[in-house]
Amino acid sequence: PTERKHHAIVMVRFAADCRAKMTQLTRALCTTLGPSTADLSMRFGLNSGPTTAGVLRGDKSRFQLFGDTVNTAARMESNGKPNRIQVSQKTADLIIEGGKSAWVTPREDIVSAKGKGRIRTFWVEPGTASSTGTGTPHFTATGSVTGMDDAMSIGGAGGKDGETSSRGNGSGRQRKRSSKHMKLQPKMKRLVDWNVDLLSLLLQDLMASNVEAAASSAKEHASFFSSHHTRKVGSIFSSSNHHDNTNNSDASNDMQMPREEVVDTFDMPLKAASLSQASSSSNVKIPPEVKDQLKKFVANLAFLHQSNPFHNFDHATHVAMSTRKLLSRILSPLSPEALSRHSTTAMKQNGSSSMSSSSPSSINSSTYAVTSDPLIQFALVFSALIHDADHPGVSNSTLIKEETRLASIYNNKSVAEQNSVTVAWDLFMSSDYDDLRKCMFQSSDHQLQRFRQVVVNAVMATDIFDPELKSSRESRWEKAFASSASDDAVEHEQASNLRATIVIEHLIQASDVAHTMQYWTIYEKWNHRLFKEMRAAYLAGRTKSNPADKWYEGELWFYDNYVIPLASKLKECGVFGVSCDEALDYARDNRLEWQQKGRDVVQRWLVDEEQEKSEGSNSNR
């Protein structure tokens, strides 16, 4: 090969270009693969010296480099950090000789490299990436991104001013509005954009459903405007009747608590979605002012989330993504699997071996109508996004023991969950989103009430440790799925509604812990974040027990007593097709892998924690 004098500098610039291109690619893939795609990153390791090159013989002949120089470069990469370029002493010397000493910074700690022992390494950051153009992100010496698109500026509710205390001593109402403009950092902006895209698709389905309902009401006016569906525009949609919670922090004392609104069952639609409705949803256009309000709402909702390691807007997005996935896995009333399941169920109930005709309406009953109501689907994803709004980063039991104001407001029951519903609903009911609500509910008080009922039940279902709620869910499950079917049409409809309610609650519960039923790497990532949150509470003196002492055993207990039984129930309810087998298999596999690796994983987390503290101390000197 032709020798190049400044090859080390060229390779550093090439690494920086690769990093920038990787960032562009992962950001572009967020829309299709989910916002966490942008969290993918690269490590770079460089070393300089003599190598042996050649083509290996065999079935997969290819040109390769061999020798100690290559091995050391591999150690530079494997012991590096995401989005950082790490180089050896030899490469650092060449960069400095080339007049780029400003690029080189000694690594704070000594690296222990396999087969090399303890070696001194360096971080390198070129001043610019040689081939990057306008809009290409650059990375600072600390690995943070600069040069991104301008952060989204959001006005209105949910600012920093007037936040509730991190110790949960706030009023439990919406945070005071800030007149200042707030800016979303690049990652948060990606999360907001992805959630807006998801909700927009659901909103189009809902709008199409509203159009069809309006067409039906023109034919059956009396039926549509029965006393059960009476419009009450003033009571719900007039901003003059909306509480201004910034002026009355104790307004919640005069209102019904969300937990008190939980019902055993709620009404589901009797008819399946028609093909005309499904085909027309893609033709529905969301008005620009509605789209703007939706984006503003999601952005302000993001600001309502505190910066906890686990209970944050990133987690809320993951739960929303999992909720949407489970909803998409529910058997369509017209799918072959639903047809087969409905026919089998009908034969069992009728005691007949003959195949009965299966209309969409009858199959809709077999899938409990969950997929037939766009309002419920929107409400479930909405619930996923708000279920940890303003979460204080500690458990309900801690909030109660500390005698916080939040605990007092919510009578020491489901404190965090009730607070999340309250602050998010206050934001949603703001006059800033009048057009959004009118688009969703067509000024129908009844539709808004149905929406809130699903939201309340779903969010309260995420309080999995409350004994009263847990007992109620278990007894309703037995009543819904263990009882034999009734021939009475009214009782059959009531049973179907009960089953739908139970399925919806278990769907949101499964989504809340979806990381335990996904790939091991995903499980470990979110498990580590929860561990860090619990450790932070312990180190701050808010909890007495060190989570590291029992984390290994606690995870095994959680799998055996909650995750695996929950995944089994998803299978038993029979509406999710083969995806329930997938969830159960992942849960069992992760449980087994944790049993084998869990103790070492916890120890590694503790070592990482000490290293982060050490690096933080060095950077502050």
Image (spheres, rainbow, N blue to C red):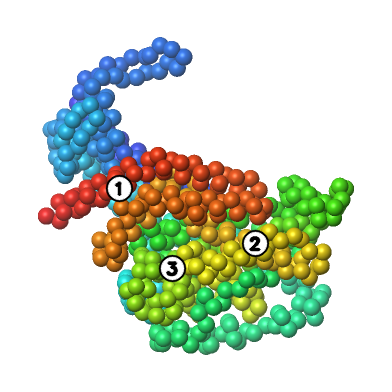
Position of 496 with respect to 19 (left or right) is right
- On residue 389, the disc is 3
- Residue 220 in sight from this viewpoint: yes
Q: Which residue is under mark 1?
A: 605
Q: Amino acid at mark 2?
A: Glu
Q: Residues within 10 Å of mark 2 (few under 14, many from 20)?
A: few
Residue drawn at x 41%, y 51% is 555
- Residue 24 in sight from this viewpoint: no
Q: Position of residue 131 (x, y in %)?
A: 33, 40
Quote the CA–CA distance across marks 3 and 2. 32 Å
Determine which quarter of the picture holds residue 102. Answer: top left
Give SS at disc 2: helix
Q: Amino acid at mark 3?
A: Ala
Closer to the camera: disc 1 or disc 2?
2
Q: Is residue 5 above or below residue 520?
A: above
Q: Is residue 571 above or below residue 155?
A: above
Of marks 3 and 1, which one's residue comes earlier in the chain?
3
Towards the viewer: 619 or 475: 475
Residue drawn at x 25%, y 64% is 540
